[in-house]
Amino acid sequence: GHKPASLGGQSETMLWSPRLSLSNFHVKLTAKGLFRNLQLLPGCRKNTVVFHAVDKNRTREVPARPSSISSPVAAGHQQNQHLHPAESVPDVLNANIPVKPAVSEPGPDAASTTSSGPTSSGFKTRTGSRSSPKTGPRLQNASRPGVGAAEGTAGSKQNQNKEQLEKKNQAIVQLRKILVQGNRKVEALAVIIQQLFTEREETLKKKKELSLELGTLRDELVASSQKCERLQREKEETCSSLEESLKRLEVQHQEELVQLEDRLKSFYQTEWDKVHQVYQEEADRCRTLMEQQVEDLRVRQEAEKKNQEEIHSQKMESLKRDYETSLQELKRIRQTDLEDLQKTMKETEAALSEKISELSAEREDLSEKLRAEEERRQRILSDRNLKDSHTVYLQQELESLKVVLEMKNNQLHQKEKKLMEMDRLVGIRTSDPSDQIPTDFSHVETNVRLEECLKKVQQENEDYRARMDKHAALSKQLSTEQALLQQTLQKESKVNKRLSMENEELLWKLHNGDLMASPRRLSPTSPFGSPRNSASFPTAAPLSPR
């Protein structure tokens, strides 16, 4: 009842079972169309097939008693144990798309029937290959004990059976690979076809939506075109009505302009007569007022002129006195500073000469010491032929004394140069005391003090010079202001003379009655002829004809 199933039936039940159909997979196609990810739906269980690797070189253990094989199920299980090397093929599972067989859990009937044997793992079909039914009895007969004479023939038959089994297993593995590859290709093709069908349905839906939208757009286009035509007709009608109203308004406006011009002419003629009379009265009143103002201005100007002349003369005298006193003070300060500088220069010269004499005496002492040391060294060298530590020390002392002597000589030369420079500077200072002392002797305190005093005196001299320049500029400014005041005084006197002459002329014309004539005959240069000159006076505002 438990016969092994063939390879084709096993693969078909494994790949085309209801739980492993194409509808239970989701395929996600990328933009390149190369990567496929097959996933199971959440309704399927995941079961894995475990392959055991068996060493082919091991000798197969034969059970001692053949009576232990009690059923064909056990025989089939034993054959499956011998055929494990054929089932351990890792190349079958090595593919780009991992296919995970998911087999539904067996029912309670299947569990009760298969619980006694080793096939109760939940698989309905096995993926491994089995041998033909003839192989089982041969192996059972070959494994019985007590047949000692037929062991050689049984061993040869067993080897032949092994070779046949290996060949069959290899053929089965190749067929399985080909079958798995074909099944995967068919699955991929089915998934692609399903994807194309879904895309086609989506495009059909989009097509229907776009056709509906196109119909609505056409209706809107027809409505908008009708509305545009209606608006165009309304525009033409309004343009024609506006042109007619514009012509009518232009005619009416021309008539109103003619009427308004006539009214304005009559109104402004009467206003002109009134304003002319008012301006004439204002001109007479302004003439008298101006004569009084001119007389007052002449008196004030004379008094201001005298006052300015007195103030200017006083300022000039005070500035001259200040200038003379400041000049005398500057001369005195400069003379005292020059005397102080000469005294300090003599003191520094004496101090430097004393230092030079001391350094020269020290130099002579050092030279005498050096000569004495050399003589002593010569005596020591003549007494002792071998050099010891004391002679080395004396040589070092001699070298140090030479170095000190050279340094002192350099200092003496520098002091002599400085003394010569000081003599030259003293001579230059007596001839031109405004020059600055060079700052080459900064290490001497007296020279530093002299430099500071000289800088201070020079700054004071510059300040006094600046003050003198300011005084000179102020005197020049005052003189120019005096000249300007004299010029303005002359101009004002000329203006006063001209105004007096014009007043006399106006008085003469007033007595002769020339001013009673029409204002149109007045001269354009007369200050009272134009009505604009009296615009600041309050007059009656003209009334509008409207």
Image: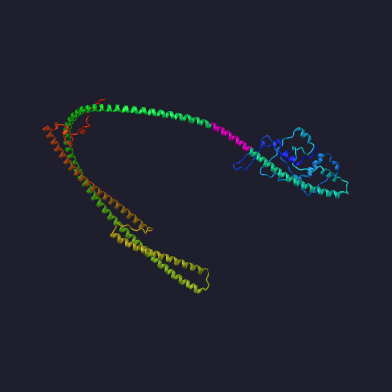
| Residue 28 falls in image quadrant | top right
Residue under the point 48% across and 31% down: 221
Is residue 341 rendered magenta in the image?
Answer: no
Q: With respect to residue 276, does 4 lie above or below? A: below
Where residue 95 appears, as percent x and y from the top left, is: 68, 44
Residue 426 visible somewhere in the drawing: yes
Of all residues shown, which one is farthest toward the bottom? 382
The residue closer to the viewer here, 82 or 370, is 82
The residue closer to the viewer here, 263 or 460, is 263
Left or right of residue 45: residue 522: left
Residue 542 visible somewhere in the drawing: no
Is residue 196 rendered magenta in the image?
Answer: yes
Which span is picked out in magenta? 194-212
Q: With respect to residue 503, does 237 lie above or below? A: above
Of all residues shown, which one is farthest toward the top? 546
The residue closer to the viewer here, 97 or 335, is 97
Residue under the point 62% across and 36% down: 197
Where residue 3 appears, as percent x and y from the top left, is: 80, 39
Q: Main secondary structure of the magenta part?
A: helix
The residue closer to the viewer here, 297 or 539, is 539
Left or right of residue 118: residue 266: left
* Quadrant containing the N terminus in the rendered view: top right
Where residue 373 appears, as percent x and y from the top left, is: 46, 70
